[in-house]
Image: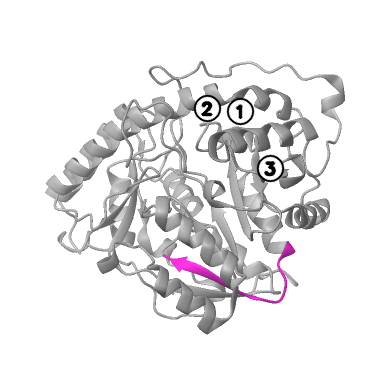
Amino acid sequence: MSESTIPGFRRVPRTGVIYVMNRARRRGYAYTDPAWANLGQGMPEAGPLPDAPPRVETITIDVPRQEYGPVAGEIALRQKIADLYNRLFRQRKSSQYTWENVSIAGGGRVALTRLAAALGNINMGHFLPDYTAYEELLSVFKAFIPIPILLDQEEGYQAPLATLKREILGRGLKALLVSNPCNPTGQLVEGERLRRWVQMARDLHCSLILDEFYSHYIYTGMLNAHPPKIVSAAAYVEDVDKDPVILVDGLTKNWRYPGWRLGWTLGPKEVINAIASAGSFLDGGPNHPFQAPAMELLDPEYVYQETEAIQRHFTKKRAYTLERLRDMGIMVEAEPAGAFYVWANLAQLPPPLNDGLSFFAAGLEENVITVPGVFFDVNPERRREVARYGNYSRISFGPSMEKLEQGLDALARLIANPPKE
């Protein structure tokens, strides 16, 4: 690992999205500049959607909430989250979540960092490709050893249950970190397959840590169904305090409030106590003033209405994006069943556009941003020399339809007139 020129410090790499945004800013990008389209963004559009609940525009902060809050979050908010999961996924089940099964954190990365800090000296499995921020997360904490599990394009970037069992037993995995739906491929584990994953975790004594931040962006259900289809492993947990299933979610994606920086972890009380202890020295606790207004966003009917609007709107953007990319000669080996990304194979494009880094760099000349696929080859501490996914790019349909059209038009112009090598 390269050293800093300042004594005692190391060079800390930026995650893929942060890297591309810094490069774009050096080329003149600004959020408010209408000339640019950001198809690399990892957040959904945050404005009003047809038939969605009204957006929160003002917040009143009580004086006591300007003080430090509890490290694990206010009990009222924790109970509200527990009640939501019980209503959505655990009706008529004897084991129910309570506030003691919930911890609030300052967003998803903080929640995952707390979990990583609470893990012991174990082998922990993670998939390739997966969320870019996992790379440094898996590098910083030295107690556990990250073990990569390669997902094959021939399998549609899915992990067969037999393969997972073999990895867990053969490599002695005690934990498995997975984004579901997956960022960047959009692949989804649901229904009977997800039930078997939970059963596997129970039987093999391997903690299943599921990043469910995109669990409301589901495209395998019926549009306009009420309630809408939402996928969570919470539906298949038998005992909330004994099953080794830990879920991470928050307001960032499924509620479309990324700037609020509020996330949560749901799991056995023992795990919640451990990550609260980690939070006491890592971050000191989540945003206090925003916890009270978050309560009203967690009413089941509000969640259903927001999710229905998301699924109608993003289903249209998904179909539009897939059609435009295929017209450009970009391959999509596995259509996204969830999230709002397309894992785009550039191999059939003319050089140098068949390389994700070159595709990104050339796109900046057309004022469009993408994320090179190599950033999703999660490689903690650069243990592997050969990088995968050089021919891939993650293209987001998170922006508004107007920006999506603008960005895809820019990519079409780029491919029609490729730069010389």
In this view, the residue in front, 189 or 71, is: 189
From the image, state whether disc 2 or disc 3 is nearer to you: 3
Location of the N terminus by quadrant is bottom right
Q: Position of residue 316 (x, y in %)?
A: 27, 31
- Residue type at mark 3: give it: Tyr
Q: Residue furthest bottom?
A: 170
Based on the picture, tell me whether residue 146 belongs to the magenta stretch. Answer: no
Sequence order check, earlier mark of 1 and 2: 1
Kindly state the secondary structure of the residue where label 3 is placed.
loop
The colour scheme of the drawn protein is one colour
Label 3 crowd bin: few (<14), some (14–19), many (20+), radius 10 Å: many
Magenta segment boundaries in residue numbering = 118-128
Q: Position of residue 19 (x, y in %)?
A: 48, 54
Circles 1 and 2: CB distance less than 8 Å? Answer: yes
Q: Which residue is mark 2?
A: 303
Question: In screen coordinates, is 333 left or right of 203?
Answer: left
Q: Which residue is mark 1?
A: 298
Sequence order check, earlier mark of 2 and 3: 3
Based on the picture, tell me whether residue 126 belongs to the magenta stretch. Answer: yes
Circles 2 and 3: CB distance less than 8 Å? Answer: no
